[in-house]
Image (cartoon, grey):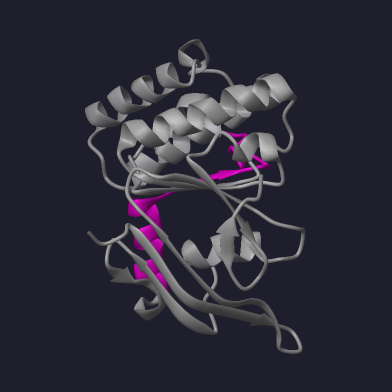
Amino acid sequence: MSALLELSGLVRRFGSGRAVLEGVSFALQAGEYVAIMGESGVGKSTLLNLIAGLDRPDAGSIRLDGVELTQLDDDALTLLRRRALGFVFQAFHVLSYLSVARNVELPLELLGWPDAERRARVAEMLRAVGLEDAAARAPGELSGGELQRVAIARALAHRPRLLLADEPTGNLDPRTAAQVLALLKAQVAANGGAGLLITHSRVAAASAGRALVLDGRSLAPLPP
């Protein structure tokens, strides 16, 4: 069976030609939730940006559900991101001028979901993240943990094939971080897709089904 995500020989160079990623290959199956660790500067966020089509490799292949991303133009990549990917960032990126419900609803509106389906899905996702009573509140009224849960609800509302989470617990206290990690894992499983978690934390990595270490050239299992 083909992998949901397949990376082959990825190379990305910056500036004077220094390779941040050099020949990285990796496969992610549907249903998997994988953590990627590594020292600062080894290319973890670069790898995520390449997978998301926000950056382009200098060489190599990126296939998502059999589609070769390196052959898509910018408009096609934008549409693919909107339909197939979900993002959760350390900095939340929740829109301050929209209510909690509208933040979650916006991706569905951009995808053309009918009004009734949008409202039902927003309500479902807010219940899933424990924020059903906060639908009308402004982001400025929420704690950091609540904002991260809004970001998770928004990222997963359209049932993406692939969730990309970049240090999603870096700004959270340990208890809230544990809640967020459990929520991410549960929601990826519920949606039937797959997830990649970028983290510096072994505790966070332990929440995933498997953990890998990136050294710029390869992804290897995390040593005990």
Residue 57 percent across, percent down from the top left: 53, 78
Q: Nearer the viewer, residue 93 or 89?
A: 89
Can I make out residue 99 in this image?
Answer: no
Q: Does residue 84 belong to the magenta stretch?
A: yes
Q: Nearer the viewer, residue 209 or 147?
A: 209
Residue 118 percent across, percent down from the top left: 30, 31
Residue at the outermost top position:
133
Residue 1 percent across, percent down from the top left: 22, 59
Q: Which residues are magenta?
A: 74-99
Q: Quadrant of the C terminus?
A: top right
Q: Nearer the viewer, residue 185 or 25?
A: 25
Q: Is residue 189 left or right of residue 205?
A: left
Q: Residue at x 26, y 62 (%)?
A: 2
Q: Is residue 32 left or right of residue 207?
A: left
Q: Is residue 92 left or right of residue 106?
A: right
Q: Residue at x 47, y 33 (%)?
A: 185
